[in-house]
């Protein structure tokens, strides 16, 4: 599939108003921003010179905000080799060894991951979801007639994401619940950036991020799906799975590239099992400070391990005590 590169969007970080250019570019162009030169120079000094890097000038991703970058482009070179929280975060939650394995390993898409992707699109980009996610017909592809019907359907929907009727219903309902929460608690959310890609050197290494929903200078929100949406469950998941550090990492990259100070970090939770519903939670000021520490720790360890070429496993104790609740 050929992806046309979107026109760049320009942000006035003082008023958060946008206007779109009409001219199409031959390659993705980041947002025009006011860059904090001290932050950029400090981070850039930790990077190897451009001529010493393996990528050429044409292949390099420049720091900036790319609001309309198609996800397949984000998942491919030259974006894909850049570290992201999905691997770097394991330096904080697991170990550098786990982080390196996550970065080197090939991700096998599961049904749960496919459903999660569908729910994200159904919630934040319902028009795209309606166009790209379709339920294929029930045909017996073991028969000649069934094979012919299937081939005809595939030809008519070359770029469609195939989901079952049950998955489509789940994604649609979850998306409706998520948007209802946003409409009630954050009425201006449709004007925010959705699925924006960012490249930044803020942590001393060129990294990437893809933000579900953000408004520079206002908030960063990440959508998370869960089977159990209860206070106890999400409190543990937010820390143990690194969601807090992920949000802080996203904010640091966003603020560096947009020259803003974004005060709010939130998670839009969606329960995928009955009874399906959604909720928006914000991290407290104290939690945000801890999240910032988690993000700095993870990226700092990543830079150290990459420099030394040593990726240590977790320290496993020789003896363990019974937990307090036992």
Image (cartoon, helix red, strand yellow):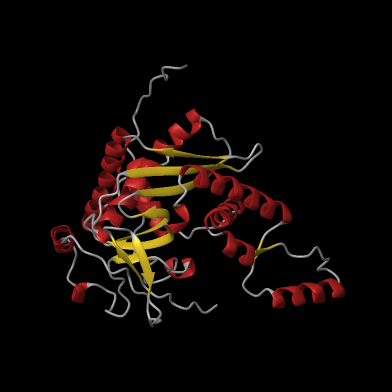
User: In front here: 228 or 66?
Assistant: 66
Residue sitting nearer the eye, 219 or 167: 219
Location of residue 15 (image quadrant): bottom left
* Rendering coords of residue 58 (x, y %): 31, 80
Tell me what residue is drawn at x 29 percent, y 36 percent: 290
Q: Is residue 135 left or right of residue 184?
A: right
Q: Residue at x 48, y 28 (%)?
A: 232
Left or right: residue 162 compared with residue 64:
right
Q: Is residue 313 visible?
A: no
- The spot of residue 91 in percent (x, y) is 32, 46
Decide if residue 284 is in sight here: yes
State the residue at coordinates (32%, 36%).
315
Q: Is residue 50 above or below residue 302?
A: below
Percent across and percent down for residue 233 are: 50, 32
Residue 257 percent location from the top left of the image: 26, 61
- Horizontally, is 227 left or right of 284 in the view? right
Q: Quadrant of residue 292?
A: top left
């Amino acid at each position: 599939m050929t992806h046309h590169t979107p026109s760049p969007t320009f942000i006035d970080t003082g008023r958060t108003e946008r206007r779109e250019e009409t001219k199409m570019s031959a390659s993705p162009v980041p947002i025009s921003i006011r860059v904090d030169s001290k932050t950029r120079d400090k981070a850039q000094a930790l990077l190897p010179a451009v001529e010493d890097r393996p990528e050429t000038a044409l292949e390099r991703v420049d720091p900036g905000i790319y609001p309309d970058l198609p996800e397949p482009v984000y998942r491919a070179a030259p974006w894909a080799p850049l570290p992201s929280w999905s691997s770097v975060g394991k330096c904080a939650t697991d170990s550098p060894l786990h982080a390196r394995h996550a970065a080197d390993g090939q991700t096998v898409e599961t049904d749960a991951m496919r459903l999660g992707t569908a729910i994200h699109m159904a919630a934040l980009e319902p028009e795209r979801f309606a166009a790209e996610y379709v339920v294929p017909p029930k045909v017996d592809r073991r028969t000649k007639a069934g094979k012919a019907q299937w081939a005809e359907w595939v030809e008519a929907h070359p770029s469609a994401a195939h989901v079952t009727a049950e998955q489509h219903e789940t994604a649609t309902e979850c998306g409706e619940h998520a948007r209802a929460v946003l409409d009630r608690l954050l009425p201006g959310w449709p004007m925010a950036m959705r699925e924006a890609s960012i490249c930044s050197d803020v942590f001393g290494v060129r990294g990437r991020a893809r933000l579900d929903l953000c408004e520079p200078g206002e908030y960063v929100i990440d959508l998370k799906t869960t089977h159990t949406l209860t206070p106890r469950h999400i409190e543990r998941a937010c820390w143990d799975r690194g969601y807090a550090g992920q949000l802080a990492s996203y904010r640091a990259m966003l603020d560096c590239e947009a020259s803003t100070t974004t005060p709010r970090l939130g998670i839009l939770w969606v329960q995928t099992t009955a009874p399906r519903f959604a909720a928006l939670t914000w991290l407290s000021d104290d939690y945000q400070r801890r999240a910032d520490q988690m993000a700095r720790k993870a990226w700092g360890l990543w830079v150290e391990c990459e420099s030394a070429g040593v990726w240590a496993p977790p320290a496993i104790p020789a003896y363990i005590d019974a937990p307090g609740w036992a």
